[in-house]
Amino acid sequence: MTAVPTSAAPATGPSPSAMPTIPHQRPADPRSPLSRLRPRTTPARLTAYLAVSLILIVTAGAIALTDSLNRGTVIDEASGQRGRMAIAAFEMYRALSDADSAAASAFLPGMSSETDLSTAYESGVSRASTAVITLADEATTPEQVDMVARLSATLPVYTGLIETARTYHRQGLPLGLAYLRNASALVREDMLPIINELQAEATSDLYDAKSQATAFPWLATLAALTALGALGYSQYHLSRRTKRVVNPGMAVATVVVIALTGWLLVSWGSASSHIDAGHRTGTEPLEALSNAHIGAQQARSNEAMTLIAQGTNTDYEAEFATIMTNLIGEDHESGLLGEMAVRYEDPQLKAFVEDAMSAAQDWQSAHVTLRQLDDNGEYAQAVASAVGRDSGQAGEAFDRLNAALTQANELAAQKFNDETVAAGNALGLTGVGFAALTVTGMFAAAVGVQRRISEYR
């Protein structure tokens, strides 16, 4: 058998040169996509910590600054446009009621030449005119502007009716009474409802401002706490990387952010406390006292109109009884005045309300006597009681009630102004302070981390 040379043996597989080349492949990276984005060197990590810390510090400072400025603006509006609008509406309502009451009383027999009654009417008209000017300056919406324009146009009509009525009354003509009734109807049916609507809108605005001014600064607080968390996290890793327990710059930045957070919360708490006090001792009592004062003036006008009508119109007496029930209740111990005497804790305000309650009780008793005199034909004595200044007379009791309510109204308005100004003062330096703290915190953090980064160069 002949041997076959090895070189001549048939190939058992493809030659190496004929085999396809397989490209080289890197092993798969076991890290997650987020892990691959993390900086690998220590300086890069420190730079990232610094960048995040700076962003969060400036965010916290900016949000705190914005919150403080917005809150201050709301408080300024409450003490400014909104507050002036509400107080002017209250004042005009009272002034017109005062004028209408004084005008009606001046028509009582023998009272047409009474100087004090004439002065009271002129004072009421003057105060109403001033209030209209204030309302015109503070009106912001088209509806408010329209209502104020209607008041401005109607007030001269009212005074013209009163002057015509007084002219006829001096001549002894009964036509004066008709003009007086028309003037009183114009006030009650046209002017006072408009003022009441303006008053309601202004008061609603004040309550909205209160809600905005006292709202907790959640976003600013969350931003500040987030910045503190980032600073704490950064310092923890700094201490591990650099083998130093405390980084002075980051420590200062942390203290600065803590100070900013504390100032934010303290200023909010102080401003909120003053705003709440302003509404508790100012806005709320002012609204209730104004209603009581207006009611008293309308009751005074009804008492006079009943006497002037000499029994020909009982509607005035019925309205008088309704108003007095609202003021002191059927038991003469409750009603609006009784509720205020129990509700409000301010000693001075409480004293004024209690004086008003006592005067209203005396007036109710004197009015019963007055009506008995009138019903028994003793008209002159009834009129004398209505305008009298002696103890036990209706006029004297009303004067005490009017004085007590006037003092209480003035005190409530002053309380509102004082507390609102104090709330604004609580935020007075926060704008500059928050900006300065933010810059200081950023600078301290940057210096502290940059020193560590420089050690690796």
Image (tube, rainbow, N blue to C red):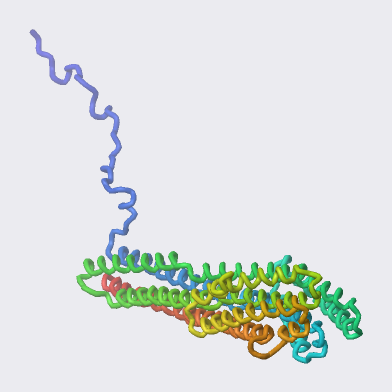
Residue farthest left in this picture: 1
- 7 and 110: which one is in front? 110
Left or right: residue 388 versus residue 347 is right
Is residue 5 in sight in this rendering? Answer: yes
Q: Quadrant of residue 401?
A: bottom right
The spot of residue 194 in percent (x, y) is: 73, 68
Q: Quadrant of the C terminus?
A: bottom left
The residue depicted at 21 percent of the width and 73 percent of the height is: 245
How many numbered circles does the render carry? Answer: 0
The spot of residue 269 in percent (x, y) is: 43, 75
The spot of residue 147 in percent (x, y) is: 75, 69
- 6 and 322: which one is in front? 322
The spot of residue 91 in percent (x, y) is: 67, 79
Left or right: residue 119 versus residue 4 is right
Q: Quadrant of residue 84?
A: bottom right
Q: Is residue 96 above or below residue 41?
A: below
Left or right: residue 397 versus residue 437 is right
Is residue 73 in sight in this rendering? Answer: no
Q: Quadrant of the N terminus?
A: top left
Residue farthest top in this picture: 1
Residue farthest front in this picture: 376
- 199 and 215: which one is in front? 199
Q: Quadrant of residue 368?
A: bottom right
The residue depicted at 87 percent of the width and 82 percent of the height is: 169
Q: Is residue 39 above or below residue 385?
A: above
- 164 and 259: which one is in front? 164
